[in-house]
């Protein structure tokens, strides 16, 4: 069940922010135009739109204002690559997000808790920092002592209908996954360029 605070956030920022908002019930409640009772929302200024897009990213990935600013700063310093593309790679390369993309939980919030509780090993080293940056070639394994935890029960069954992005893979039998390549942008509801423009002011 979606909580009232999350419902309000989804109603303001769109259903893509939280997985639990992506239901027909949510669409019916928000109406055709996304406002309360289906009322058409007021037109936003360019600045207002950029603020909304910034909040979408923050709530989607569960990151702080400072983390967001740091990701943008880091992406802007890389030469020879599109800033928006690099910005997306920074967001998607977080360990909590990679585990989410592998299909081990239905939300990034859940995977953040799983990482913080020490359930994962990256390249044979236990990592408890959700923002830990993984890279192509990195192996992500469920810690031996965590494999019997209830959250990992029936992994093959849970993942049978899940299709992971092409840049990650997970073997439910071995309970380990791998980062195959750099993340490819699959989040069509996020306007990364609008956020970059906001921070370039």
Image: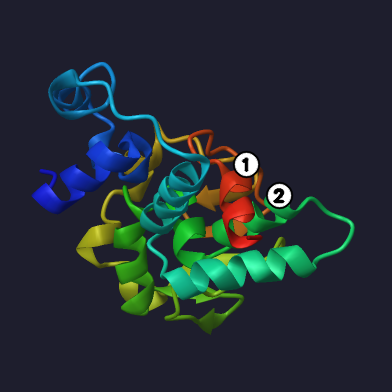
Q: Residue at x 63, y 60 (%)?
A: 201
- Kindly identify the residue that appears in the image at 28 percent across and 20 percent down: 33
Left or right of residue 37: residue 169 = right
> Mark 2, residues whose alpha carbon is within 10 Å: few (<14), some, or many (≥20)?
some
The residue lying toward the viewer, choosing from 172 and 184, is 184
What residue sits right under mark 2 in the picture? 85
Image height of 31 relative to 59, above or below: above
Q: In this view, does 131 lie to the left or right of 26?
A: right
Q: Distance between the residues labelled 1 and 2?
A: 8 Å
- Residues marked 1 and 2 touching at CB (< 8 Å): yes
Dot 2 lies on which element? helix
Q: Would residue 78 be visible to someone looking at this image?
A: yes
**Residue 154's x, y, as percent?**
28, 49
Q: Where is residue 77 in the image (x, y as percent from the top left)?
A: 78, 69
The residue carrying pointer 1 sits among few (fewer than 14), some (14 to 19) or many (20 or more) residues within 10 Å by Cα, namely: few
Q: In this view, does 62 lie to the left or right of 171?
A: left
Residue 30: image quadrant is top left
Q: Is mark 1 on a helix, strand or loop?
A: loop
12 or 93, nearer to the observer: 12
Q: Residue furthest top?
A: 32
Residue 126's disc number = none
Give the residue number, with chain letter if any, for mark 1: 185
Position of residue 139 relative to residue 19, above or below, is below
Q: Which-is-in-front pick, marks 1 and 2?
A: 2
Q: Earlier in the sequence, mark 1 or mark 2?
A: 2
Residue plotted at (40% across, 35% down): 160
């Amino acid at each position: 069940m979606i909580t009232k605070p999350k419902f309000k956030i989804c109603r303001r920022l769109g259903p893509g922010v939280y997985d639990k908002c992506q239901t027909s019930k949510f669409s019916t409640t928000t109406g055709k135009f996304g406002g309360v009772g289906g009322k058409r929302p007021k037109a936003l200024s360019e600045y207002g739109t950029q603020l909304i897009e910034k909040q979408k990213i923050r709530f989607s990935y569960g990151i702080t204002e400072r983390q967001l600013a740091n990701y943008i700063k880091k992406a802007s310093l890389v030469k020879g690559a599109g800033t928006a593309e690099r910005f997306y790679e920074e967001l998607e390369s977080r360990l909590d997000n990679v585990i989410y993309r592998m299909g081990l939980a239905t939300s990034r919030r859940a995977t953040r808790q799983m990482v913080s509780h020490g359930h994962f090993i990256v390249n044979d080293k236990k990592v408890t920092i959700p923002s830990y940056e993984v890279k192509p070639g990195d192996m992500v394994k469920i810690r031996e002592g965590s494999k019997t935890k209830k959250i990992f029960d029936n992994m093959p069954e849970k993942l049978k209908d899940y299709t992971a992005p092409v840049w990650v893979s997970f073997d439910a039998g071995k309970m380990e996954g791998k980062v195959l390549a750099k993340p490819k942008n699959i989040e069509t509801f996020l306007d990364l360029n609008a956020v970059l423009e906001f921070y370039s002011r």
